[in-house]
Image (cartoon, rainbow, N blue to C red):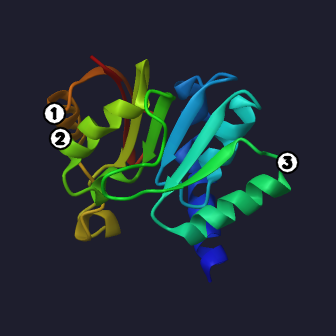
Amino acid sequence: MKKLFAEMFNRKASDPKNKPDQIMEAISLKPGQNIADIGSGGGYFSLRFAKIVGEKGKVYAVDTNSNLLNYVMNSAKSMGLDNIIPTIASNDSLGIPEKCLDFIFMRNVTHHLKNRTKYFKDLQKYLKPEGKIIVIEYDRGKYLSFLRIFGHYVFKEIIQQEMKESGYIFKKEFDFLPDQHFTIFSKQ
């Protein structure tokens, strides 16, 4: 069952309608960089990031579910990737060294966070001075959609305001995702 859950996350992330190749291109990740995939789920993006950053870079696969992280690590091992570091997220720490990340990637997780402004502010300690946060979040959806009924979305304007209040500068926005907004922020 746990494996099916992870595979479901990966199927959804890899679905061409969700434009994973365009997401990767927009991020412009380079060999040797470090990135945290917060809410890594089944690891679809963590595994892709690991291939790009190579042996000199690191990918921190961050999740609250150890079974999902085990799945990610088993997938990485089978692909010959040894630059993914599984990280259990706690309320007050990500367990990542400070000032080591070029990017923090958050896809479809901000709607789960209770105090996003504080959370975003706390993430600054993990970023290098030129580090960036990538936020991809669901739009509200149609009238009777799952997203709308269960509150699995955050308006783009709210994310932008909370990031500003947390000390970030809006850098870029992409509009190619059909059901999500996609923004990048940097430290001030």
Residue 93 lies, in percent from the top left, at 37, 50
Residue 141 seen in the current view:
no
Left or right: where 19 falls relative to 168: right
Type of amino acid at the residue the image marks with label 1 = Gln
Relative depth, front residue between 76 and 18: 76
Relative depth, front residue between 5 and 168: 168
Image mark for residue 161: 1
Question: Which quadrant of the view contains residue 113?
Answer: bottom left
Residue that carries the numbered disc 3 in the rendered image: 80
Image mark for residue 158: 2
Residue 133 lies, in percent from the top left, at 39, 31
Type of amino acid at the residue the image marks with label 3 = Gly
Distance from Cα at disc 3 to Cα at disc 1: 41 Å
The residue tagged with tag 3: helix, strand or loop?
loop
Residue appearing at x 65%, y 38% in the figure: 49
Image: 166 above or below 16: above
Distance from Cα at disc 2 to Cα at disc 3: 40 Å
Relative depth, front residue between 26 and 45: 45
